Structures are given as C-alpha cells and as structure tokens.
Image (cartoon, helix red, strand yellow):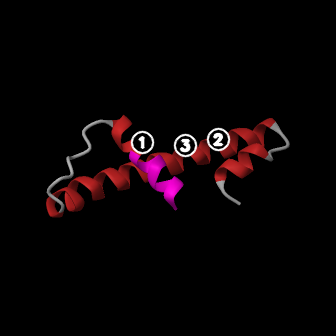
Amino acid sequence: MNAVQRLLNCKTPAQCLESLVWFAINLLIMILIIRFLWNTSLVKHITILKPATSLLDTLLLALSLSLIR
C-alpha cells in the first residue's frame, strides 16, 4: 500500500499524522535524488536539457515521473 492510500485509509489522527510524515519524507528523498541525478548525469549527456535550479522544478519533475511510472 503506498503512502497516499495509507493517508486516505487512516482510522485515527495518529495514523493520519504518521502517514503524512512518511509521505513528506518520501517526497523529499525522491526530490533530492531526482535533482542530483538530473543535474549530474542527464544534463551532461543530453545537451538540450537544462539543470533543475529550483525546488519547484524538481518537485514538478518528480511528480511527472511518478505519474508516468
């Protein structure tokens, strides 16, 4: 069960808070990993790509990649 499903199916406020914290941690880790990989490897090898400079760029990139997945 993924973090969003756990958040929607929580029974107590403590479970909701725990699910929300795990969702935020997972999202932050994913954003940091994607930004690192994007800026260090993809930008160097594919010349039309530009580095992700802001947190919003990286967040949108992470969300679009998770939608494709």
Q: Amino acid at mark 3?
A: Ala
**Element type at mark 3:** helix
Q: Residues in magenta?
A: 61-69
Cβ atoms under marks 3 and 1 closer than 8 Å = no
Q: Residue furthest right?
A: 11
Coordinates of residue 29 in the picture (x, y in percent):
44, 51
Q: Amino acid at mark 1?
A: Leu
Q: Residue at x 45, y 55 (%)?
A: 65
Magenta segment includes 65: yes
On screen, 56 above or below 7? above
19 and 61: which is toward the camera: 61
Q: Nearer the viewer, mark 1 or mark 2?
A: 1
Q: Residue at x 52, y 51 (%)?
A: 26
Q: Tell me the CA gap for discs 3 and 2.
A: 6 Å
15 and 6: which is toward the camera: 6
Cβ atoms under marks 3 and 2 closer than 8 Å = yes
Q: Which residue is mark 2?
A: 20
Query: Taking the image as drawn, is residue 29 in sight?
Result: no
Q: Residue furthest front?
A: 48
Mark 1 or mark 2: name the one nearer the start of the chain.
2
Q: Which mark is residue 24?
A: 3
Q: Residue at x 16, y 64 (%)?
A: 45
Coordinates of residue 18 in the picture (x, y in percent):
68, 44
State the image quarter where residue 59 is shown: top left
Q: Which residue is mark 1?
A: 59
Quarter in which the N terminus is drawn: bottom right
Coordinates of residue 50 in the picture (x, y in percent):
20, 47
Query: Taking the image as drawn, is residue 4 in sight?
Result: yes
**Element type at mark 2:** helix
